[in-house]
Amino acid sequence: MESIENSNSFTQASASPNMAAHAPNYSEDWNRVFATNCNYNNPNNNFNNNIYNNTYNNTYNNNYNYNFNGAITYQKIKEPDTEATIRMKDNFVFFALSAFVYAVFYTFCMFQNDAGIAFLFFIIATLVFLCIVLKKLDMKLKKGSIFYFAAMLLLAISTFCTDDSRIIIFNKIGIFLLMMSLLLRQFYDTSEWKLGKHLSSIFYTAFGSFSQILRPFKDAKKYVSTKGIKTGNLKYMLLGTAIAVPFLIMVVALLSSADVFFSQMTSNLIDSFSDVESFADMFIRTVVVFMGVYLLIAYLCKHTLNENVTDMRNGEPLLAITITVLLTAVYILFAGIQIFGLFLGKLELPEGYTYAQYAREGFFQLLAVSILNLILVLVCLSFFRESKVLKVILAIMSLCTYVMIASSTVRMIMYINSYDLTFLRILVLWTLGLLAFLFLGVLIYIFRERFPLYRYSIIIVTVLYLVLSFSHPDYIIAKVNVQKQTVDYEYLNTLGADAAPVLIPYIYENKLVKTEKYYLKEIDRDEKSLGIRTFNVARYTASKIKNNYS
């Protein structure tokens, strides 16, 4: 009699050992451990009280539980560790200690410090830490990594040179994405990856790292059980720490009395440790960063992601052609109207409708359509079979999109001239410029499949964003808006220290000091927060300008 049920381990009984030969062939690898105790009284065999211990490799596509007179257990083969994982486990002390030191340094640099110079030091330490980890894993930096290093350093420099919270947030997001892209390039062969593969891999890596949540504890347990703890070394480390502490206290006291900035920094640190909430905050930061770094390294070393890129271009091109032909026909008509109506002014406007009104409308809608067209072109190129007709249509659609980008840009500039400049409007103009460069890459990619569109996009986005980041939008906004006949001072009052070279002279020259209640107070508050860790170029410059007028 035979019973079958789904299970990862199962038992066979009630049959002679040769019945195992009648088991079907399956497709999943299992490790078959055959340990049978038989007691047969069959004259045709010599199985009396024999013990069989045999190991087989068989292939199964289902899990079964058979009842025989004996025991056969099947266990799924454990996936072997990668070379990088083996190196990491063998050097547990190095990786754990390095991650801990890195976490402590992060807390020192970033605690109550959103955009100080310590952020630059932290990014430098991050890149150095990455190089040390790669060297320990016997990996070399791949060609092209210097671009990622330079971009992250420039973003870090931009961060401590600005007071614009929006730019600071964008900078940190940019550094995160660049770092994740760099790590994927180091641990995987990404030469054939497309945009979707890169973005999904960043997502899976960031969240997949949590699957290694127990790794630090397992690695520590294995290291102690196999190599043990050298009590002699530990004794010397504790003794050295005990001897160093008094000298450390004395040296810090002497250096604090020698330099006012160092004294201020140490005082702030001591105050932080004396504050229970601040100490808890620092402790949690250190633990979270330590775990995050260790889990990320462990996940990358496992090489979990599939490097292979599946060609998804199996869709019927006629479907895409039908959709894009209809849209492109509308775009051609719209592009003609833009050329003759907006750019050349040849079309007659509706009654009661001025040219200025016509030009100042629709820029956000055109921006949305341009972004939609970019997505649509990339989808057609990624999911439909190659077709010359489809390529031509997509190229025409891209060219029509250039007309929309130009139209939206003209409309936005005219709107700014009539009203005020804001950060959102600067961001719209920047996005339009970015789309123009991206569509250039798309046009090349349409007719040249080997064109590295993702790499091109990364470079374009990074370079253009660095231009935006270092341009200090708040300064540009203040410079443009104070020249208007009617100045919206309430809006200018919300700008950061980047606008100080324009706003502070404007406040004093127009005798607004008595009525001004916010901006100058913010400058004073920022000046008091400046220190060795928190030094910020924009905030320092603003305080110096204010002091010159006071």
Image (cartoon, rainbow, N blue to C red):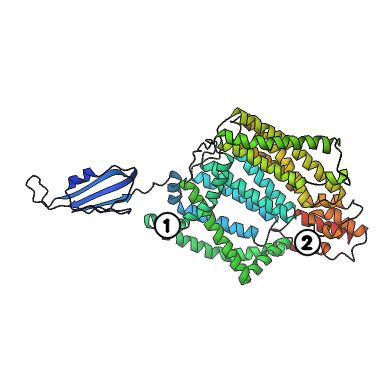
The answer to which of 146 and 72 lies nearer the viewer is 72
Q: Nearer the viewer, residue 112 or 300?
A: 300
Q: In this view, does 450 lie above or below 22?
A: above
* Label 1, label 2: how far apart the Cα atoms are: 48 Å
Query: In terms of secondary structure, where does tag 1 sit?
Result: helix
Q: Residue placed farthest to the left in the image?
A: 43
Name of the residue lying farthest toward the front: 351
Mark 1 surroundings within 10 Å by alpha-carbon count, few (fewer than 14), some (14 through 19), many (20 or more): few
Instruction: Please report the residue visible at 49 percent of the width from the left and 63 percent of the height from the top.
Output: 238
| 66, 338: nearer the viewer | 338
Look at the image and tell me whether residue 117 can be seen. yes
Quadrant of the image occupied by residue 544 = bottom right
Amino acid at the residue labelled 1: Lys
Q: Nearer the viewer, residue 511 or 68?
A: 68
Q: Residue at x 43, y 55 (%)?
A: 219
For this view, does 371 lie left or right of residue 546?
A: left
